[in-house]
Amino acid sequence: MTDPMKYETLMLYTGADVEGDTMFPDSPAIYHATAYRVKDTRDYDKKNAGEGFFYSRSRNPNRELLGEAISFLEKGEKTIITSSGMAAVSTPLIALLKQGDHVVASNAIYGETIEVFDILLGKFGVEATYVDFSDIEAVKAAIRPNTKMLYSEVISNPLISLVDIREISKISKDAGALLVIDNTFSTPYVTNPLTMGADIVVHSLTKFINGHSDVTGGSITASAEIIDSIMHTYYMLGGCLDANSSWLALRSIRTFGLRMQKAVSNAQKLAEALEKDPRVRQVNYPGLKSSPYYELGKEMFPNGAGPMISFLMEDDRDKVDDFIHRLKMVQYLGTLGGFRTSFAHPATGFRTEFTPEQLVEMGMTEGLIRISVGIEEPEDIINDIIGALDAFGTL
């Protein structure tokens, strides 16, 4: 009996064949068509029900292939491909929540996700409570009779703390609520929340999965039943990804395993180097033995602790800018997850959205830097960042 192919090998072959295509190109064509001919009224009924293609907002061959590949990566049944990560976040929330519903969300999620809950859904009578999801008892205490959803990320931004998905899923199931997990930071290479009890997993494909800084996209993966319940809202909101971007993202998945293996290895080496530098006050990375999440990380992350790091320096904005100016290779970007190493300054990123007191409360002090680790040679990354730390004094 032939052994099943390895996960990394299947990553190269899943989502390769377009439904109805008999030419079998080694790289799928890009289907720019907005509409497809229909034979008759019965054929229309079939296509409108999801068999074949008739209008690009509902189904497109390139989106279908990408969805098949994401479902494989996340070990889910079905995936919706959206036009951005925020479309992936907001679509299931709008589809599944209604007036009077309550959500328990992590207090360490993406700032714009908080805005979706508070500004968009809040206008329609949905209430969100934010708690520390690393405190299981606090999560339990926040549950109400009308709690319909729990929402979290696996790895928080920007403090790189972990959430025990298995424990949180027990709470959601006891409450009869859905558990939605944003897996963008950790990626399916590192962990698969659906296998740990999550009901829905969302991604910004813009980040590590695409990984080339040339696509804006998102995904929603869940059981076929849940996805079918979201699909009508997805159609109505119109947040579908175009054919060319879908093709590019699928292309990127073919090297996803290789890229993540290198990035995660580099992140571990960089974290260890930063921890040894006396100018660095704290390194947030679950792969370090000093991390309070080290043991949980070993349980949740069989392939390493992920590609994201944050570290704390002196809270001096002028010195932080000097540090930034000294970097020769690592770039300051308003996103993350590319094949090149980049960084962000969280306090600046959210300076207009939160008060100085709120930023400090959330851990976004002036000395905090978040690193998205790329696939360069590790020595080059380490030398560039450690060299720039001379802004805080030479060793």
Image (spheres, helix red, strand yellow):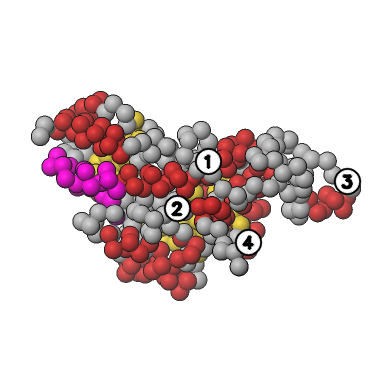
Residue type (three-letter) at the residue carrying disc 2: Tyr
Query: Quick one: label 3 or label 4, which is nearer the N terminus?
Result: 3
Residue 141 drawn at (x, y percent): 35, 69
- The range drawn in magenta is 268-286
- Secondary structure category for the residue under label 4: helix
Residue 18 rendering spot, x and y as whole percentages: 70, 46
Q: Amino acid at mark 3?
A: Lys
Q: Which mark is residue 252?
A: 1
Q: Which residue is mark 2?
A: 189
Q: CA distance from mark 3 to mark 2?
A: 43 Å
Q: Position of residue 392 (x, y in %)?
A: 14, 33
Dividing the picture into quadrants, the one containing residue 2 is bottom right
Question: Mark 3 sits on what residue?
Answer: 39
Q: Secondary structure at mark 1?
A: helix
Q: Residue at x 37, y 44 (%)?
A: 263
Which residue is the site of mark 4? Answer: 224
Pointers 3 and 1 in contact (C-beta within 8 Å): no
Q: Is residue 282 magenta?
A: yes
Question: Quick one: quadrant of the N terminus?
Answer: bottom right
Question: Disc 1 or disc 4, which is closer to the eye?
Answer: 1
